[in-house]
Amino acid sequence: MYTSILDINRLMTDGDIRRTPPLEDAPVSSSKNDIRADLLAARERMSPFVIAQVNAELAEWMYALPVPVAPGDTVAAYVAVGDEPGGTAMLDALGDRGLRVLLPVVPPGPPTRLLWGEYRGEDALVHGRWDLLEPAESLGADAIGAARAILVPAIGADRSGGRLGRGAGYYDRTLTTADAPIIAVVYDDELVDRLPQADDDVPVDWVLTPGGGFIRTPHLTVNE
C-alpha cells in the first residue's frame, strides 16, 4: 500500500512553518496520482495564516529572480488557485519591479497550449473556464515567447527538474517550445529528490520554495 511521502506534522497551523530536511525520494512504483493526492491532502491542512506567510515570502523572492530582467521586460506567471503557493502578492511584486506580467488563459476544448493575457491588477481579472481567474483579453498562445522567465504552478518538484502538475497537460504542451527558464513554485516540503516522470513531461530549470529560494536544476540550458 502506498505510504505518504509527506509528514503533515511538518506543517504547523499556528502561524509558522517548521524548516525540515528534504523529503525522501518519492517511491518510483507509486503513481503520480498517489503522490498528487498525498501532497494535495497536506496542502488542505495548512492554515490560511501559513499560506499568507508563504505568499509574502515568495513575493520577496520576486525581487531576486535568477534571470536578468529590466523594467519593461516580460515575465510569465500564474494566478494561484485555492491553496497553491504564490498569490497575487507575487504578481504585484513583479509589477512593482516594472515588469510586464503575463497570465494564462485557458482555451475552450480539449487540453492544448495555454493562451496568455497581461496582468493589470487583481481587480481586472475575470472568471474564465472552470471559474479560474484570468485576464479579460487574450494575446494568444505565442505571447509567452516574449517572456524572460516563466513561473509555473506545481504540486511537487524534484531536484532533477521534474515537475508534478494537476495532470491535464496544459503546461507540458505550452512549455515544450519555451525559450526562457522555467521556474516551478512549490512549498518547502514539496521539493523532493525524485518524482516519477513520463517522456513527455517538460523539466523545469529552477524550483522556487519560500524557505530555500531558487534552486537550480541540471536542466538549466537557456539564458544562463
Image (spheres, rainbow, N blue to C red):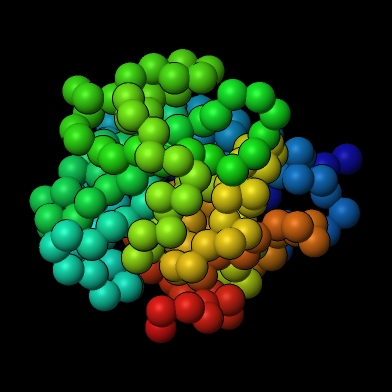
Answer with left or right where residue 190 lies relative to residue 70.
right
| Image position, residue 13 (x, y; %) | 37, 33
Taking the image as drawn, is residue 107 in sight? Answer: yes
Q: Residue at x 76, y 38 (%)?
A: 33
Of 185 and 27, nearer the camera is 185
Q: Residue at x 32, y 73 (%)?
A: 67
Answer with left or right where residue 6 lies relative to residue 84.
right
Q: How many marks?
A: 0
| Image position, residue 132 (x, y; %) | 44, 23
Compared to residue 12, the image places residue 186 above or below, namely: below
Of 45 and 99, nearer the camera is 99
Compared to residue 57, the image places residue 169 above or below, namely: above
Q: Residue at x 38, y 24 (%)?
A: 133
Q: Residue at x 28, y 67 (%)?
A: 65
| Image position, residue 25 (x, y; %) | 70, 63
| Image position, residue 201 (x, y; %) | 70, 57
Residue 62, quarter of the rendered image: bottom left
Taking the image as drawn, is residue 212 in sight? Answer: no
Quadrant the N terminus occupies: top right
Of 54 and 202, nearer the camera is 202
Compared to residue 21, the image places residue 134 above or below, namely: above
Of 7 and 76, nearer the camera is 76
Answer with left or right where residue 30 lies relative to residue 35.
right
Quadrant the C terminus occupies: bottom left
